[in-house]
Amino acid sequence: EDQVTQSPEALRLQEGESSSLNCSYTVSGLRGLFWYRQDPGKGPEFLFTLYSAGEEKEKERLKATLTKKESFLHITAPKPEDSATYLCAANSGGGADGLTFGKGTHLIIQP
Amino acid sequence: EAGVTQFPSHSVIEKGQTVTLRCDPISGHDNLYWYRRVMGKEIKFLLHFVKESKQDESGMPNNRFLAERTGGTYSTLKVQPAELEDSGVYFCASSQNDRLINGYTFGSGTRLTVV
């Protein structure tokens, strides 16, 4: 069974304090590893898709990387508006097209 | 471009009642998905439509849940009769066939509370 585990569950940082969120996955035939951002009362908002080990993608202060077992979301010099829950999800090649989600990391950036 | 629209945004019903959730996907998106997040757990896949056909309903909890997609446009998810454990946030998502590149677009969800 496909599994996605995120850590930490919650993270509180000072504005400007860089850090990384972890997503470890066990899936049969990864087709894509997705990162989403979710704000309170909203649905997940697409950030990145990564396909193969060694791949990196960037968007503003966020950079996502992928290995064969993990993905990291690096946040550089975060601002309070980066506060959100960050979700990792995997799409496997097992025939089903649904995403397998982790529980998310709740990130708080204090001014 | 309008996003994925879900309504109602909140619903409180009594155990044993029936509730119908609706999702309007982005126009032109053939793929439509339903997900659910139960408190304290991760978001879980329920089912996938391609146009009006159910492609995969492996995540549907039991036969109290019925999903339909009329004419390949909007979709409804009916829970009948509702049980306490059905409480949670129900998300709908849609995508084109390039979903591995551009991702899936989610609605804001329907928060269902069964009392």
Image (cartoon, rainbow, N blue to C red):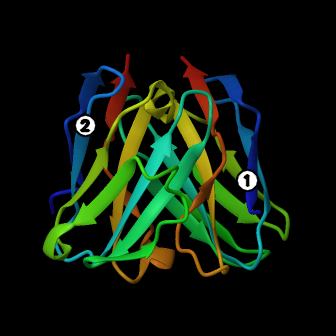
Residue A24: x %, y % from top left = 80, 54
Chain of the residue where label 1 is placed in the rendered structure: A
Q: Residues within 10 Å of mark 2 (few under 14, many from 20)?
A: some
Q: Which residue is mark 2?
A: B19
Q: Is residue B74 above or below residue A81?
A: below
Residue A109: x %, y % from top left = 58, 24
Q: Which mark is residue B57?
A: none
Q: Secondary structure at mark 2?
A: strand
Report the amino acid beneath label 2: Val
Residue A79: x %, y % from top left = 52, 31
Q: Quarter-wise, where is residue A20 in the image?
A: top right
Q: Which residue is mark 1?
A: A4
Report the amino acid beneath label 1: Val
Determine if residue A60 is in view.
no
The foreground one among A3 and A107 is A3
Which residue is found at the position 65% from the left and 43% from the top?
A: A76
Quadrant containing the C terminus of chain A is top right
- Using residue A46 as the reference point, say whether residue B105 is left or right of it: left
Which residue is found at the position 69% from the left and 26% from the top?
A: A10
